[in-house]
Image (cartoon, grey):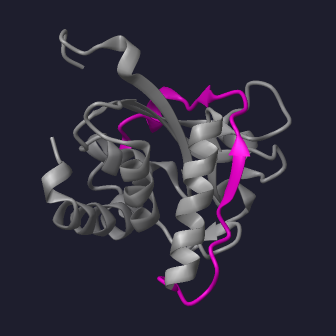
Amino acid sequence: MTNNTDKSQLQYATLAGGCFWCIESAFSHVQGISSAISGYMGGHINSPTYEDICTGQSGHAEVVQLVFNAKEITYQEILEIFFTLHNPTQLNRQGNDIGSQYRSAIFYHDDNQQRIAQKKIQEIDTAKIFEQAVVTKVCPTDVFYAGEEYHQNYFNKNPQNQYCRAIVSPKLAKFKQTFISKLK
């Protein structure tokens, strides 16, 4: 974030779209995003750990919480990117990652975000962009728990990890090609 940023323009967006490494790695390259933090939201236990999340019993989803400058990128644009980074028609999974922790969800921070998210899902379904209907849940923001330090900026720190090479890297390459005008 630059020193010239008007802090009144900073807003939050919290998104769940499968493995948080994929979502975080893409959004960390987007203009107007000052931070992308991997974490957990939407569950019923306090201070969950990654091990808690992996059981599927905590109720939390893997999420990425973004801080963005609304003068540089809109919430609508963030959602457009989000819906290209995962398959929002898969219930409680993304590819081989299976469980409610991998669900597709938008955790809105205010009524305007809720309206924009619901409208975007309706537009996608009406346009039949996917063969099946979008199952992304639109939920009020809950307590955000930042993930463990080793999860932060994971792809950049571990590009040779097998999961990163097979899953994150191809998604990131496609994302960069599609949204070249939005990159930092």
Q: Residue at x 57, y 36 (%)?
A: 39
Of 52 and 182, nearer the camera is: 182
Residue 2 position, x and y percent, is 19, 16
Say whether residue 132 is magenta: yes
Say whether residue 51 is magenta: no
Please report the bounds of the magenta region as a residue range: 128-154
Residue 136 position, x and y percent, is 65, 63
Q: Quadrant of residue 45?
A: top right
Toward the top, the furthest residue is 3
Of 2 and 155, nearer the camera is: 2
Left or right, 76 with respect to 18, comes to left
Quarter of the image for the N terminus: give it: top left
Q: Residue at x 68, y 38 (%)?
A: 41
Residue 120 position, x and y percent, is 53, 62
Q: Is residue 142 above or below residue 29?
A: above
Q: Quadrant of residue 169?
A: bottom left
Left or right, 156 with respect to 66, comes to left
The secondary structure making up most of the magenta span is: loop
Q: Residue at x 73, y 32 (%)?
A: 142
